[in-house]
Amino acid sequence: MKFVTILKAVTKNWIRSRAGLFFSILFPILLLLVFGAIFGGQGGTSASRIFVQNLDRNPDGTQTSLSTGFIQALNSTKILAIVDVPTDADAKSYARDQLGPLGGNLRILQVAKRFQDDLVNGTLKVQVGISYNTLNMTYQMFAPYLNDTQKAAYQQGLQALQQLNDTLPRGRTSLTLMLDASDQSAQIIKNIVLNVAGAFNYQLIGAQNVIDYKEEPVTSTSHTGVDYYIPGITAAFIMTNGLIGLTSNTTEFKRRGIIKRLSITPLTKTDWIVGNVLSQTVLNIILALIMIAFGWIVFNVRIIPDAYTLTLIFLGSVMFSGMGMILSGLVKDVEAASAIGNAIAFPMMFLSGTYFPLEFMPSYLQTVATRCP
Amino acid sequence: MKDVVVEVDSLVKVYGALKAVDGVSFEVFEGEVFAFLGPNGAGKTTTVEILECLRPLSAGSAKVFGYDVARGGDVKEIKRRIGVLPQEFSALDKLSVKENIDLIGSMYRKKLDTLEVIRMLDLQDKTNERFENLSGGLKQRVGVAAALVSDPELVFLDEPTTGLDPKARREVWEVIENMQKLGKTVFLTTHYMEEAQVLADRIAIINKGKIATIGSPQELIAMHGGLKTLIIRNGGKKLADALEERYGSTTLGHGEDVFVKVDNVKEMWQVLSELTSMNVERDVEVKTPTIDDVFLKITGGRITEEGELK
């Protein structure tokens, strides 16, 4: 039962160490708070700022009704915070001045001069084209049943529509979106602008949705990001506590001769190893309970671990702490122990699916990931 | 005749091409303080760690309490009966003095009361102090306490005062003297000549893996230390020449000091009478040979404060 003495002593030593306590318990809590604040869906998110220059003006200098409507539609998404750029200003210089010396992402949308005209002409062209196609299709279908007078009237009508269509201009480049390639939100903003423009187009030509779309949750209860981050971060730290924390700590004991001193006593190697592994297991269970408590108190997320979860925590702790003990037996200095522990733990952490979905990875990495503990 | 506690015969330890211990033989008797004196790299710690069952031997034999250190079955019995202060003792930083001593003590079936050991080492004021907050001397005392908590019959102290200031060193010496009073057998390794001479009943001088000589400090000094020396401070060349002519073995040192080697007390008194008759009014000192002189004579070198041979 000497392992119980070792368990008590190393746990006490670890808990009293500020660095040990920080990296094994407080750091995961901080990480949970940060991830929870970002992805927990609480507190709302700020809109992305975009500079919009509307060059489409009436002769009296006021904005045309369609360009104004389009900008309002963009604004109604609540995702974009629109900053108006004066018509006579150079849009890029103006935006840079507004962003100030600290900079920020340069996002500019320019509504071209003939936006309303292009939109009206384009809509007319589409409508006339549809009318022409409909008339032509009925003519082709019913021609055998028509007399010559009827046929001549049809062709006259088709010719008149063709002539009208030819008078309508093709100009369609009414919007110019300028984005920074390094802007992480660029793709989202581009999609929002395209979607609003598309909806605008459909509205004008009177198209109706033929495909209906609705969302349904596949889980019985709804989950927020925190529900996934609590077990993810806990699992990641059970691994790093065993592979990095315990390895470094035990190697430090070895460097300072503490293990040698204990090995002169009747203490067996098994007692030493079991004591250390169990100490880590106790700490990891404490960590899991604290993470659950924080999830409950801060994010109102109630996770109640069942026997299966507790068994997994226990087995995970035993396995990673065991790996840590093996590693500390192989290396001599703390720096090497920490480096090797990191080299093993971090690839496994990123291959665990906790931070990135496995589906995003190449197939060979997915194979490696499924074989990692 | 006292019982033999440690019995080493033709012990050899080889690391690759290096022979760290080269055919060492000696015995340690019950109740004595036995000092293993030598410079760094002489083979002291290697020998001790073989006796503590920490390292396997390459050849020869070593027995502690009659148990063979090379036999797996005997190791447990040896570990149960010895106490060890390893070189550069360290403990769990965040645990208190009492908790650290308790930790070591809990490894043994038979153990002394921790508070009693703390009292024995005069550590009462530091009982609940964390190990990391102690001075070097106090840490060594905790190490000695940890070595004594199992009430061992034989205590190995490996370089117990290395790195300590003179005051802390004297404190540890006091502890070692008390151990002997308690009837413990003490196996002390050191590179400090004075430490060995003050504390040890017998000294083995070890150099380059071999024992150069072994005996009590008095025996070693008598055998290898040479003559007593009378030092006449600022005596000058004239006095040196006069004494050389009369007694021989006289030299003039730096600062005009005159050194006269004398064979015995009678000759010493003769020199002193001569000085009186010559009206020489100078400070006179008598220098008795020490273990330092023995070591110099045997190895041809001296050990520095850091333990290096020069």
Image (cartoon, helix red, strand yellow):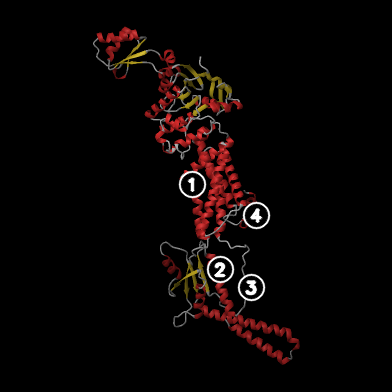
Q: Which residue is mark 4?
A: A363
Instruction: Say which label, 3 or 2, has the lower sequence index.
Output: 2
Q: Residue most toward the right?
A: A144
Q: Element type at marker 2?
A: helix
Measured along the vertical axis of the image, is residue B96 above or below residue B305?
A: below
Q: CA distance from mark 1 to mark 3?
A: 54 Å
Q: CA distance from mark 1 to mark 4?
A: 38 Å
Question: What residue is rendered at 55% in x and 40% in y?
Answer: A276
Instruction: Say which label, 3 or 4, has the lower sequence index.
Output: 3
Q: CA distance from mark 2 to mark 1?
A: 45 Å
Q: Element type at marker 1?
A: helix
Measured along the vertical axis of the image, is residue B5 above or below residue A95?
A: above
Q: Element type at marker 3?
A: loop
Label 3 or label 2, whichever lies nearer to me, is: 3
Instruction: Say which label, 2 or 4, has the lower sequence index.
Output: 2
Q: Which residue is mark 1?
A: A21
